[in-house]
Image: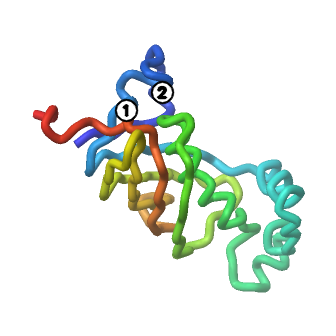
Amino acid sequence: MLTRNLLSVNVPCLRGFSSAAASFLRTGDKLKLSRIFTSEDVLEYSKVSHDSNPLHFDSESARNAGFEDRLVHGMLVAALFPKIISSHFPGAIYVSQSLHFRLPVYIGEEIVGEVEATNIREQKNRCLVKFKTACFKNGAIVIDGEAMAILPAPAVEQANTSA
């Protein structure tokens, strides 16, 4: 099993992928990315999404609703999943995503996004990959679900060539 962290990938390109190590994917492989969301991230996301819910901008409104402070948009946090996949597999097509929002994410918290390949099906010159997805803060799951993405066929190592 292979676990990769996007922050440490800095290898020359191979076959159009972001790194030689990232050019193959097998069931059980995990890819991760860590990020701290800022007030500016929340503001910029709100401009694009038109989501101006006061829970994201007003601490008092957030506390009155039972939260500790202002919230990061859940969909902004979930955007880590396609970021992780496309960073390792440029040209990947994100097909679907299911999400379960488990805990709030507050501005300034470090969030670790993780995708794990759970099923890989080759189709002609590309592969349909099912991923288990999760975001964590301090080890606790804040978002989980599943994603499907289409990756170019060279992204997936043939089962008969693995050790």
Query: Hey, which quadrant is residue 21 in on the image?
Result: top left
Percent across and percent down for residue 75 are 67, 64
Q: Residue at x 46, y 14 (%)?
A: 12
Q: Residue at x 79, y 85 (%)?
A: 64
Percent across and percent down for residue 15 are 44, 22
Using residue 56 as the reference point, say whether residue 78 is left or right of it. left
In 3D space, how far apart are the residues under numbered discs 2 and 1 (Cα atoms)? 9 Å
**Circle 2 crowding by C-alpha within 10 Å: few under 14, some 14–19, many from 20:** many
Residue type, numbered disc 2 = Phe
Q: How is the image coloured?
A: rainbow
- Viewer-proximal residue, 100 or 137? 100
Kindly check if marks 2 and 1 are in contact, taking CB atoms under 8 A apart as contact. Answer: yes
The vertical placement of 30 against 133, above or below, is: above
Q: Residue at x 41, y 53 (%)?
A: 128
- Viewer-proximal residue, 31 or 41? 31
**Circle 1 crowding by C-alpha within 10 Å: few under 14, some 14–19, many from 20:** some
In the rendering, which numbered label is found on residue 17?
2
Is disc 2 placed on a helix, strand or loop?
Answer: loop
Label 2 or label 1, whichever comes before in sequence order: 2
The vertical placement of 83 against 62, above or below, is: above
In the rendering, which numbered label is found on residue 154?
1
- Viewer-proximal residue, 69 or 43? 43
Residue found farthest to the top: 12
Query: Hey, which quadrant is residue 141 in on the image?
Result: bottom left
Residue type, numbered disc 1 = Pro
